[in-house]
Image (cartoon, rainbow, N blue to C red):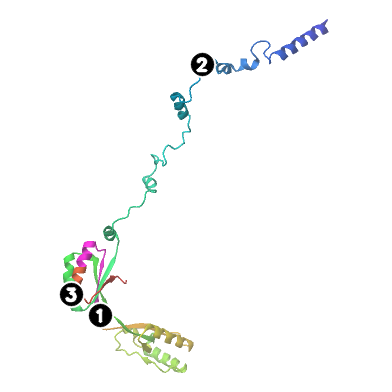
């Protein structure tokens, strides 16, 4: 009797398990666990068909377009971008030539003046009120180049060098006297004076090949110097005034500063 009861219970249980997922006994288990699914079901009675040219349909299509789609060919810079980033794409503005000259540091050199002409030029230049932007320099022309051995140990050192030169077969030299204008060369040994630096260098090369390795070159300058004016950071107006002043000195030239 117990076996029959157990058999029927199992049979009824299997039938129930078979029918529940298929909806044979009303709402299935999934619908009972997810009631929101039922609330989301479509209501056919609320649907309506719109014509192709409906304004309502067009507005819905625009509202569903991607937000990132650009509406203009070029996008404006973001509100938080630095001003430099916004201006990077803009073409650079070229300043007029007069403004460039006014802000560009420069150095203009005038002369070589004699002492008398330099005084007259300086007096006329004072009207420009350039202050410390004007510098006056003394220059001397290079007239020749001397090949020499620097002095060391006075007269006794010079005698040792003379003996060494004679041993090497070099006889064209003389000891620079104590009356020489440049005291740094006194008691040195002069090996020759040349008009150009290239000729002096060539002779030094010959001396090296014969064993003389202490020879040097020094430029010899004229005793009478020339006056040179250097003017820095001139405005266009000051440069025009300078040209007018310089016109009274036709032998002089205006050029960029050499140093």
- Whether tag 1 and tag 2 are in contact, CB under 8 A, the answer is no
Q: Earlier in the sequence, mark 1 or mark 2?
A: 2
Does residue 206 show up magenta in the picture? no
Q: Is residue 76 above or below residue 232?
A: above
Residue at the disc numbered 3? 119
Q: Earlier in the sequence, mark 3 or mark 2?
A: 2
The mark closer to the camera, 1 or 2, is 2
Of 18 and 41, nearer the camera is 41
The mark closer to the camera, 3 or 2, is 2
Q: Residue at x 38, y 86 (%)?
A: 147
- Give x and y (percent) for residue 61: 47, 28
Of 70 and 142, nearer the camera is 70
Mark 1–mark 3 distance (CA, rounded to whole Å): 14 Å
Q: Is residue 125 left or right of residue 256?
A: left
Q: Is residue 127 left or right of residue 204?
A: left
Mark 3–mark 2 distance (CA, rounded to whole Å): 107 Å
* Label 3 packing within 10 angstroms: few (<14), some (14-19), many (20+): few
Residue at the disc numbered 1? 225
- For residue 112, say whether it is visible: yes
Image quarter where the N terminus lies is top right
Q: Secondary structure at mark 3?
A: helix
Does residue 235 show up magenta in the picture? yes
* Label 1 packing within 10 angstroms: few (<14), some (14-19), many (20+): some
- Whether tag 1 and tag 3 are in contact, CB under 8 A, the answer is no
Residue at the disc numbered 2? 46
- For residue 212, say whether it is visible: no
Q: Is residue 258 above or below residue 67?
A: below
Of 144 and 41, nearer the camera is 41
Q: Secondary structure at mark 1?
A: loop
Q: Residue at x 71, y 13 (%)?
A: 19
Q: Which residues are magenta?
A: 225-242
């Amino acid at each position: 009797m117990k076996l029959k009861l157990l058999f029927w219970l199992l049979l009824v249980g299997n039938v129930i398990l078979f029918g529940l997922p298929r909806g044979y006994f009303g709402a299935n288990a999934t619908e009972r666990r997810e009631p929101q699914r039922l609330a989301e079901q479509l209501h056919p009675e609320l649907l309506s068909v719109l014509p192709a040219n409906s304004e309502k349909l067009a507005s819905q299509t625009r509202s569903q377009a991607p937000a990132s789609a650009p509406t203009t060919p070029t996008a404006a810079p973001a509100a938080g971008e630095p001003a430099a980033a916004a201006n990077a794409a803009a073409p650079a503005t070229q300043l007029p030539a007069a403004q460039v000259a006014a802000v560009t540091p420069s150095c203009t050199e005038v002369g070589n003046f004699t002492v008398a002409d330099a005084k007259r030029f300086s007096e006329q230049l004072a009207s420009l009120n350039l202050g410390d932007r004007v510098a006056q320099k003394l220059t001397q022309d290079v007239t020749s180049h001397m090949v020499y051995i620097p002095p060391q140990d006075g007269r006794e050192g010079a005698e040792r060098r003379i003996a060494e030169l004679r041993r090497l077969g070099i006889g064209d030299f003389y000891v620079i006297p104590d009356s020489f204008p440049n005291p740094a060369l006194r008691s040195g040994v002069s090996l020759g004076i040349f008009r150009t630096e290239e000729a002096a260098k060539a002779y030094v090369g010959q001396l090296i090949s014969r064993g003389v390795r202490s020879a040097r070159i020094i430029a010899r300058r004229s005793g009478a110097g020339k006056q040179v004016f250097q003017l820095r950071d001139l405005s266009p107006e000051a440069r025009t005034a300078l040209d007018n002043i310089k016109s009274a000195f036709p032998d002089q030239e205006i050029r960029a500063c050499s140093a």
